[in-house]
Amino acid sequence: MNQLVKVMTWVFAGAFFATAMTTMAQASECGAGTIADLNKVGETRLRVMLFRVYDAALYTDSGQYPEFEKLALRIDYLRSISSRQLVAATEEEWEKLGYDIGSEARTWLTELGEFWPDVRQGDCLTAVHQASEGVRFYNADGILGEIDSSTFAERFVAIWLDANSSFRRNRDQLVGER
């Protein structure tokens, strides 16, 4: 019986280690090629009440914000969130920032819902924006989709980087002010 317990312990430990390594490898691959030539500006962890939601990091070619030609925002999720909830949160944040949710914004939200996946703890999404262009979205599997609109890009990154964003402390950490 003692031998069986040892074998089961090793099997469990091996499975746990393999799962942890796969999750870490996926997280490190999340748009890695898109940020390889960028410099980290700042990072933060979003907590809502007692819940850890995600870790975020901002990268730019200059290593500063708002001076950039290329920007990447990487989010590593610490809890599961459905695609529908991500899209709804995007719309809610735009409304808080005073953006009109007209037909163009509705089209963008629909597009996001079509290619953003449900995320689980350990998943990541990276948004990459070239100045005066749109945004490409990546996860550990590669490119998810793109919205080719500089207006969309400005509004999307504003959720995290605007001085009036909902989570000002997190915003300040991302842009390197704290």
Image (cartoon, helix red, strand yellow):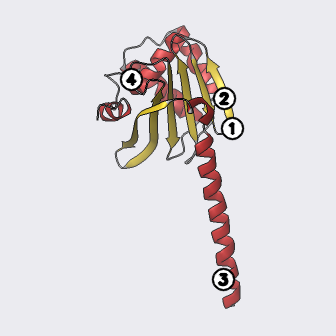
Q: Residue 50 location, x and y as percent? A: 36, 49
User: Which quadrant of the figure has residue 172?
Assistant: top left
State left or right for residue 1 relative to residue 104.
right
Q: Which residue is mark 2?
A: 144
In the image: residue 40, left or right of residue 113: left
Residue designated by label 1: 141
Q: Secondary structure at mark 4?
A: loop
Q: CA distance from mark 2 to mark 4?
A: 25 Å
Amino acid bearing label 4: Tyr
Give SS at disc 1: loop
Give the class, few, some or many, for how many residues have Cα within 10 Å of label 3's Cα (few <14, many ≥20).
few
Characterize the local packing of mark 4: few (<14), some (14-19) or many (20 or more) Cα atoms within 10 angstroms: some
Near-viewer residue (88 or 32): 32
Q: Residue at x 55, y 31 (%)?
A: 35
Question: How far apart are the alpha carbons under marks 3 and 1?
Answer: 36 Å
* N-term mark: 2 or 4: 4
Which callout, 2 or 4, points to the residue nearer the camera? 4
Disc 2 marks a residue whose amino acid type is Leu
Residue displayed at 71% across by 85% down: 4
Check whether the beta carbons of the residues at disc 3 and disc 1 lie within 8 A of each other.
Answer: no
Residue type indicated by callout 1: Asp
Residue assigned mark 4: 65
Q: Position of residue 83 (x, y in %)?
A: 58, 33
Quadrant assignment for the N terminus: bottom right
Contact between labelled residues 2 and 1, with CB atoms less than 8 Å apart: yes
Q: CA distance from mark 1 to mark 4?
A: 28 Å
In the rendered view, would you say 94 is above or below 42?
Answer: above
Point out residue 117 in the picture as x, y percentages from the top left corner: 63, 35
Q: Position of residue 178 (x, y in %)?
A: 28, 35
- Circle 3 is placed at which residue position? 6
**Label 4 to label 3: alpha-carbon separation:** 53 Å
